Image (cartoon, helix red, strand yellow):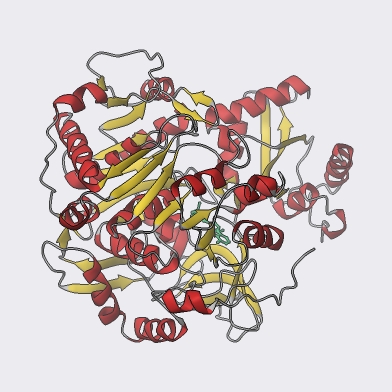
Amino acid sequence: MTTPESAVYPPSEEIVKNAHVDAAKYEALYAASLENPDAFWADQAERITWIKPFTKVKNVSYDYGNVDIKWFENGTLNVSANCIDRHLASRGAQTAIIWEPDDPNESAQHITYTELHQKTCQMANILTDLGVTKGDRVVIYLPMIPEAAYAMLACARIGAIHSIVFAGFSPDALAARINGCDAKVVITADEAPRGGRKTALKSNADAALLHTKDTVKCLVVKRTGGQTTWVDGRDYDYNALAQDAAGHFKPVEVNAEDPLFILYTSGSTGQPKGVVHTTGGYLVYAALTHEVTFDYHDGDIYWCTADVGWVTGHSYIVYGPLANGATTLMFEGVPTYPDAGRFWAVCEKHKVNQFYTAPTAIRALMGQGTDFVTKYDLSDLKLLGTVGEPINPEAWNWYNDVVGKGKCPIVDTWWQTETGGHLMTPLPGAHATKPGAAMKPFFGIEPVVLDPTSGVEIEGNGVEGVLCIKSSWPGQMRTVWGDHERFEKTYFSDYKGYYFTGDGCRRDEGGDYWITGRVDDVINVSGHRMGTAEVESALVAHAAVAEAAVVGYPHDIKGQGIYCYVTLMNDREPSDELMKELRQWVRTEIGPIASPDVIQWAPGLPKTRSGKIMRRILRKIAENDFGALGDTSTLADPSVVDDLIKNRAAKG
Ligand code: WT7
C-alpha cells in the first residue's frame, strides 16, 4: 500500500524533551541564522578550536565571473587536532572508532581516542618521510579499514590535501584522479574484502601507476596478507614503517581557507570534477549538522553505513563525529553478507543508537523479509537516517515500522558532495516527518524554487521548479580543483546570483520540501552519482562503437539503472558476446559501479536536424513509456524512434 502524501508523523514527546533542538529553538535559530549570518556562524564556530581567531566570518560573492567564497578568514586551525587532540584529556580512553570487519567471525576493533592519536601521528610521520608536506596531494584508495581514517587525519595533521578514490573504481579512473590532482603518494592496501570477496586493490594501483608520473610513491597497508607485486623504490610497507614511526606529530597550523580535501564527482558533462572543500567552514558545518540532525548526545554509538570514498563518509563517518568527540562505527562489509540481517546484527552487537543508510540498501533488505530484522534486539536505536536519493514511501514505511518500530524519527537528509553537509532535513525533535520529504532547510540555508525557463523565484506553497540556494553556508565547496571557470559555469551560470543544485524540487502546501530528482544528465545509481556523459565516452572509446547515448531508467533496488543505446560501426554486428564485452569494457574504463544494466542496439539515435540527441525520447523509451514521447516532428529521421520502441518492447 502506498502512503497518502498527506501522511505526517510528528515527533513523540519523549524525543522532543531530550532533543538538542525543539520546534521553538529551530524557529529562533533559523531566523537568527538568516537575519544575522555573521553573528550566527561566529557563535557556531566556537564549537571548534582555533589557533588564531578569524577576523571576518563571511565573505562571499555569487556573481557569475567573480564567484568567491570565503568563511572565517585569517583564522587558523588544524582539523586533526580538532578531531583528536582536544578530546584526549576528557575522553582519551573513550572509543573513537568501532571497526566492524566484513567477516563477522573476525574480531571487531575498538579504537580509543588515545590510540587514534598514536596511529594518526605514525601515519603523519610516515607520509612526511615520503616527502609529503603542507599543500601536497595524497590519494587514498583503501577498503573501509581504520587506516583509511588514520590516513585522512594524518593528511589533515600535515596540512596535506587528501583525495579519496572509492575502491570500486578501476585503475583507469584511479590514474585519472592521481594525475588530476598531481598526487605525490597513493595509499592503498593489498586487498579489499567485501561481501566475502576480495578486490585486488594493490594490483589495481599497480596498473594505475603505469599511467602516472614515475615519482608517485605507493604506501601499502596490509589487510589480508594477499600476494602483491612490489616495485622497490616506489612501494612502501606501511605496517613495517609504522613499527618504527613515532606516535607524536605536531599538528600543522593551516588557514581556514586552505583545502582539506578534494573529492571527484560526476557532473552532467565531461569527466568528473575535483570538488574542493576547505578547512574551517567545512569542519564547523560537518560538526554542527552531525550533532543537530542526528541529535547526537555524549556516549551515543553512531553508525553511518557509507564508504569513506563518498562525501557521506567524509562528513558523517570521520570529520563530523570525531570533531564532536563521538563514537563512530566503521563497517567494512555490505548489507547482505553473510545474509540480509547483517546491518541489524551489527546494530545489536554494538548497541547502535543512530543509524544512517541509503534508500537502495533499505529496498534491497526489505525484499528479503522481516525475519532478518525481527530476530535482533534493536532497542538501542533512537534515530534512523537516509541519504543519497529520494526515498520511496514503501521503503520509508518499512524502515519506520520494521526497523524503527514506529519510535525512531527518520531524518531524510538532502545534500550533495558540493554542499559538505546536510542542507535540508527534518530535525528529530523539531519537525514532523513525511515519507519521502526532505522537509526543512538547515540553519543558514535559503532554498528557492525557480521557474526553470525564466529563472524567476516562485513564491508561495504548492509549487514546483528547480532548486537553488540563495546564499552561502560554511560547508560549501569553494572551487573545482584546477578549474575555477568550470566551477562557476556549473553552479552559477544558469541561474544568476544563486547556487544551482541540479535538482528539481517541490514545496508542498505546508511549505515542506520534496526533492524530485536531478534535472540534468546526471543519474543516481544506488545513491551514487553517475554522469551519463562519462559512460558514453567510455562506450565510444571501444573500437566497435560508433555512437552511444546513456540515460537512467527506474530500477527496483538501485533507484535508477544505467540504460545504454549503442550504435555500432558499420562493419560490426550485434551479438551477445559483444554486449558482454562492452559491459566489461565500461567496468574497466570506470569501475564496477558504472556497469551498464541494459544495452540496446540502436541502428540510429533520435536527433534533431541540428544533430542534437533527444534524450527526452530515449528516457521515455527506457522507461517503457511510449505514450508520452511528445513531439517527434523535429527529428531528422522520425523512423528511428519506431525501431527503438520495437527493440525495447522485445526486451519486455
Ligand atoms: C545528489 C547528490 C550527499 C551524499 C550522497 C550523494 C541526490 C542526495 C537525497 C535525499 C533526495 C537526494 C540529489 C543530489 N540526493 N540525498 N535525501 N533526497 N535526493 O551525494 O553523489 O553528491 O549526489 O543525490 O539528487 O543532488 P552526491
| Placement of 538 over or under 286, stated as above or below | above
Viewer-proximal residue, 518 or 269? 518
The residue positioned 40% from the left and 13% from the top of the image is 227
Q: Is residue 341 left or right of residue 187?
A: right
| Quarter location, residue 164 | top left
Look at the image and tell me in which quarter the C terminus lies: top right
Residue 183 appears at what percent x and percent y?
29, 35
Q: Residue at (57%, 37%) from the top-left corner?
A: 593
Question: Is residue 611 among what the camera can see?
Answer: no
Q: Where is residue 100 in the image (x, y as percent from the top left)?
A: 43, 39
Q: Which residue is drawn at 46% across and 65% down?
A: 493
Q: In which quarter of the image is the N terminus?
A: bottom right
Q: Between residues 2 and 617, which one lies in front from this camera angle?
A: 2
Query: Total of numbered circles in the picture?
Result: 0
In the image, what residue occupies the spot 68% across and 62% down? 397
Q: Nearer the viewer, residue 93 or 36?
A: 93
Give x and y (percent) for residue 469: 46, 72
- Quick check: 445 left or right of 510? left
114 up-or-down from 90: above or below? above
